[in-house]
Amino acid sequence: MDRMRAVRLHLPTRTLSVQEVAKPVPGPGEVLVKVGAAGVCLSDVHLADGTLTPLYLEEESVTLGHEVAGTVESLGPGVGGWTAGQRVVLQAGERRGGRTHTRGVDYDGGWAEYAVASATTLVALPSTLPLEQAAIIPDAVSTPWAAVTGTGDVRPAQAVGVWGAGGLGVHAVQLLRAVGAYPVIAVDPHPAARDRALHFGADLALDSGDPLLRERVLGATDGAGLEAAFDFAGAPPVREQALGVLAPKGRLVLVGLSDQPLTVDRSTRFSYLQHRILGHYGSEEHHVAQLVRLAEGGRLDFSRSVTDVLPLEEVATAVRRMETKEGAPVRLILRP
């Protein structure tokens, strides 16, 4: 069969549809993967609604999906080290000409029956890790993991806060607990998100609209404040609120994306307390491999992360549910 089903986004009209397209053929250095599971991310929603636009896409349409797991179907010329049927997860992107190209954004992704990937972007999966759980590791888990262990450099017993307990933020809570941070404080305006954060390991979950939020954070940290705060919401008010509860020499890590200006209202206080603001984006190849190994060893459990699994034809429903937060999903999975 030389045809397959794929979810295509037409950029000029932002039209999303399931189409029958040519089944890709792996070129030199590439592998054809039969997709078993593909995550639905808010970035996909923002691509569909026009909030985000690909930087390097050469065509008018693209197959979405940057969180992908499946099995090796066939190898392109010159590829070794992989065998048909081998279970794999794909990195969310790759370096091309010194630039990071994102799968499902700048080139065709995994909301399809098959996907082509450079052999260097494949990570082998153990038989104990379900494809639905493995698929979300690149991005939903690896982005907060890189933010926590890399950019944020969180150490055991450090007090930390997470603003925004959505798909990435709630994994940050889980991962911060895994590396020994204490206390882990989640902040979100939605009660369901706060409950979810507690379920994922937060020691305290606060309403961002609580006028006593600063006092509650200081009370939970013996008056010291947070040594690290993570903004997964990408909202200017969040950043101002987080800066207000940082300990001296504390750091604010910006993970959520925003096109709004970054401002520091009280710059004298910021300088006096030697605060830092750090930008963060995505993850590196070794982060996905680390997380797969930790899941294989039983150190991390992603079974709570998959809210629902839907067929490819229900992609519009999946996108709507992520956009409206219907059912408070962590991640929805498409299965071709």
Image (spheres, helix red, strand yellow):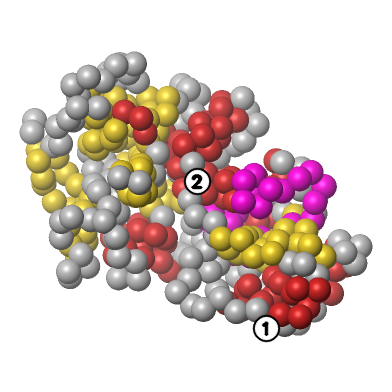
The image quadrant where one finds the N terminus is top left
Give the residue type at disc 1: Asp
- At x 56%, y 32%, the residue is 290
Query: Which quadrant would residue 275 be assigned to in this image?
Result: bottom right
Tell me if residue 306 can be seen: no
Magenta segment boundaries in residue numbering? 148-171
Query: Which quadrant would residue 88 be assigned to in this image?
Result: top left
Q: Earlier in the sequence, mark 1 or mark 2?
A: 1
Frontmost of labels 1 and 2 is 1
Please indicate whether residue 11 sits to the left or right of residue 276 in the image.
left
The image quadrant where one finds the C terminus is top left
Residue count near mark 2 (Cα–Cα under 10 Å), binned few <14, some 14–19, many ≥20: many
Residue with the mark numbered 2: 283
Please indicate whether residue 324 sits to the left or right of residue 296 in the image.
left
* Above or below: residue 43 compared with residue 87: below
- At x 30%, y 54%, the residue is 105
Q: In the rendering, at what x and y percent does residue 255 appear? A: 55, 60
Residue with the mark numbered 1: 265
- At x 35%, y 49%, the residue is 99
- At x 62%, y 73%, the residue is 238
Q: In the rendering, at what x and y percent does residue 193 appear? A: 60, 63
